[in-house]
Amino acid sequence: MIFTMKAIDIIKTRQLEWANRKGLGLNKKYPLYCKCIDCNIYGGLNEEVRKQFEKGSGNELNDEIWPAKMEALFSSSALCVNVFQYFAIGNKNNVLDFLKACKLISNNYQGDVIPVDFEYENKNIQVPIRFEEKFETGIPYGVPNLDAVIRTKSKTGKKQLFAFESKFTEPYSSSHRGNFLKEKYCSESKIWSYNGCDIYKALNIDNKENICRLIKKDEKEEWEEGRYIFDYKYLDGAQLVKHILGATNSLKNNIEEKNTEITLVYLWYDAFGTEGAMHREEIEDFRKTIEDATSQKIKVRHATYQEIICNLCKRLGDSHRDYLNYITERYL
């Protein structure tokens, strides 16, 4: 008999063992959760970053009834912050190094990060990385949050927006019910056009097999009208499409950002097995589907956190050793 352990159980066990080795204070009632958010974040959650999460709609910090989502050892938002925040605080560390580690810009890139305004302590400050940034899709129904956003401008004037979606254990969860797009998105044709492309038509969402139906995700939720637009087991393609709609509609309605090139970046944690391999195949299929549908006017890139961490180790020097030790010991 061959015993196989599920990817999500392996990841959670490794995180729990890491926490035990470090002597972190864990929640006695919920042993996979830290006692506080700062215990789960390298250097603690920066106040500017905290404010950004408070303004987001992901409800990551709320601990009124249950432990906060970001207190979970397997939290994808904590993973994102643990990797990104180091480059986001006061721009003391070079964000371009991070983009190069992700292989999103070349090593000889000539340009800089465009800091964006963020209201903090009743004043506007400029931050190089925005967490939980909201992008309006063009319909009065939910506003997608992107886990992290970085904007750049080359010396030739080319502007780029890198929109990051972060995943840890979600793709390997049995409760994962992705690829469902509510009909309210499908019925608004104007939100699907971008730079001469009809994304809705190109994705063939109206095909015969993809009929509109009533779906109930669980017993507590109401019936919802919508469609399953991808046949993926691990990748939530519909969520990524909503992020694309948010980015395209926000930018095309903003004169300053109208000609900005959009790159959706999917950062995920590799499970190193059949589940991880199938997840990778689905991501690559989604990338090709979106880029073909938009004639590459919207780019999709993907990388594992393990790949990024290894690249950061090669790129950053000993002055960053504490940070590198933390992310390698915890996530490699």
Image (cartoon, grey):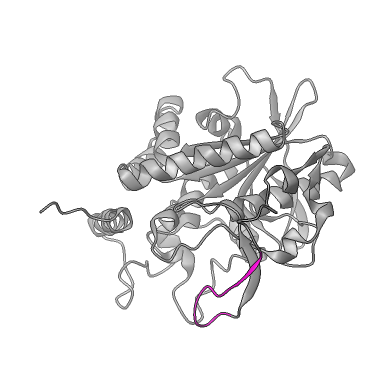
In this orientation, does residue 98 appear?
A: yes
- Majority SS type along the magenta span: loop
**Position of residue 51 measured from the top left corner of the image (x, y, whole percent):** 64, 62
Taking 117 as reference, is 92 left or right? left
Give, as a single range, the part of the protein colored magenta. 212-221
Q: In the image as oriented, which residue stretches furthest toward the right?
A: 255
Residue at 50%, 56% (x, y): give it.
77
Q: In the image as oriented, which residue stretches furthest toward the top?
A: 108
Q: Return the residue nearer the eye: 80 or 87.
A: 80
**Position of residue 296 measured from the top left corner of the image (x, y, whole percent):** 69, 31
Res. 199 image quadrant:
top right
Q: In the image as oriented, which residue stretches furthest toward the left?
A: 1
**Position of residue 53 measured from the top left corner of the image (x, y, whole percent):** 61, 61
Q: Return the residue nearer the eye: 36 or 256.
A: 256
Res. 96 image quadrant:
top right
Residue at 52%, 32% (x, y): give it.
102
Q: Is residue 62 above or below residue 293?
A: below
Residue at 82%, 40% (x, y): give it.
257
Give the quarter of the figure containing the C terminus: top left
